[in-house]
Amino acid sequence: MTSHRHNSDPRDTYLDAARECILDVGWRRTTLTEVARRAGVSRMTIYRAWSDMPALLGDLMTREWGTLVASGVDVKQAGSEATDADVAASPTPDAIADAVVSTVNALRENELFTRIVELDPELILPYLLARRGRSQELILQVLSDAIAAGQAAGLITDGLPQAVARGLVLAAHGFVLSAHTMVDDVVDQSALDDELHALISRSLAP
């Protein structure tokens, strides 16, 4: 099991305990009382941080997925007076495609995400059918900034960056959650990842 210990904030210790509990027994059997026991603190300490398990899960997922997104596209804003060096450093369609495919793979391989999908898939449904979560907002912001920077450098096709980013995220959802249903003796996972990369890079090309 991968260690996700954090030391900067006591809440991180509590989130670590919740993460371990969900990995061990699943969401439905994880309680704030059990989180407190694993964290070595009183139940009231946990209740002061989160009123219920959904609130705790929201913070846990934001931390978990946010860490993955933080290693995504490195945005360099290229303004109207961008130098050749600025343009060279701006996100290209291929760079954004690389980042999206990498993030999709990281999510598919993340042990917490995998455990939730296996045991408690209903936790994911609200973020697919009803609303955007904080992690999705973070992903959209990173992508929008990267797309805008690429557009300013003339490397990415025109279009409202926020709309383009949302289109990419909607496409990526299927590759995160359903790619395994399309893998067989004819098409393997890497072939699907190549198709996602091509889909993104072609759609962003000027």
Image (spheres, rainbow, N blue to C red):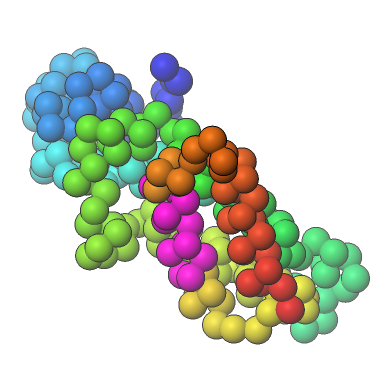
Can you name the residue that lies furthest to the front here?
186
Question: Considering depth in this image, is 132 or 66 the residue closer to the camera?
Answer: 132
Residue under the image location 88 percent in, 73 percent down: 83
Vertical placement of residue 149 versus 115, above or below: below
Residue 28: percent from left, percent from top:
12, 32
Question: Considering depth in this image, is 39 or 163 the residue closer to the camera?
Answer: 163
Residue 60: percent from left, percent from top:
31, 39
Residue under the image location 38 percent in, 47 percent down: 177
Vertical placement of residue 33 versus 89, above or below: above
Residue 167: percent from left, percent from top:
48, 70
Q: Is residue 159 left or right of residue 14?
A: right
Give residue 132's quadrant in the image.
bottom left
Give residue 71's quadrant in the image.
top right
Vertical placement of residue 129 versus 112, above or below: below
* Residue 168 drawn in magenta: yes
Q: Is residue 198 left or right of residue 109?
A: right
Q: Is residue 64 left or right of residue 197?
A: left
Q: Quadrant of the N terminus?
A: top left
